[in-house]
Amino acid sequence: WQLLRDYAIRGDQRAFGELVHRHTNMVMAAAVRQVRDRHLAEDVAQAVFIILARKAASLGVEACKDAWRWHGLRLAQRGDCGNGPCGT
């Protein structure tokens, strides 16, 4: 949680990189379970972290530590990544 706060508050890219490093396997596993296609799951997992980067500053202190991963996974699976296609 501290890594996400460091990124959201100070724009600490190293903190965000570490957060991605720590959670990529779990997000990827969840994506594979949801979409049942490894290549699509890679795109979905990447989109989850893109969504997190975009919305990090708006997450409140009370936010559940794991909620962003699941919410991001659902949004990415639907292709609802914001203003443009996922990954842009």
Image (tube, rainbow, N blue to C red):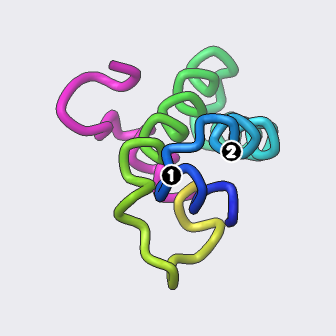
Residue at point 46% right, 35% down? 50
| Residue 84 sits inside the magenta stretch | yes
Relative depth, front residue between 60 and 48: 60
Residue placed under numbered mark 1 in the picture: 10
Question: Which residue sits furthest front?
Answer: 10
Residue 43 pos. (x, y %): 54, 22
Compare residues 49 and 39 and report the one nearer the observer.
49
In percent of the image, x 45 and y 50: which residue is there?
A: 74
In the figure, is residue 67 to the left or right of 33?
Answer: left
Q: Is mark 1 on a helix, strand or loop?
A: helix
Q: Is mark 2 on a helix, strand or loop?
A: helix
Query: How far apart in space, not on screen, are marks 1 and 2 (Cα)?
Result: 10 Å
Does residue 22 appear left or right of residue 83 in this picture? right
Disc number for residue 15: 2
**The N terminus: image quadrant:** bottom right
- The earlier-in-sequence mark between 1 and 2 is 1
Q: Bounds of the magenta span?
A: 70-88
Q: Residues within 10 Å of mark 1 (few under 14, many from 20)?
A: few
**Residue 72 pos. (x, y %):** 47, 50
Using the rendered view, name the quadrant where residue 35 is placed. Answer: top right
On-image quarter of the C terminus? top left
Q: Find out whether the residues at labels 1 and 2 contact each other: C-beta distance under 8 Å.
A: yes
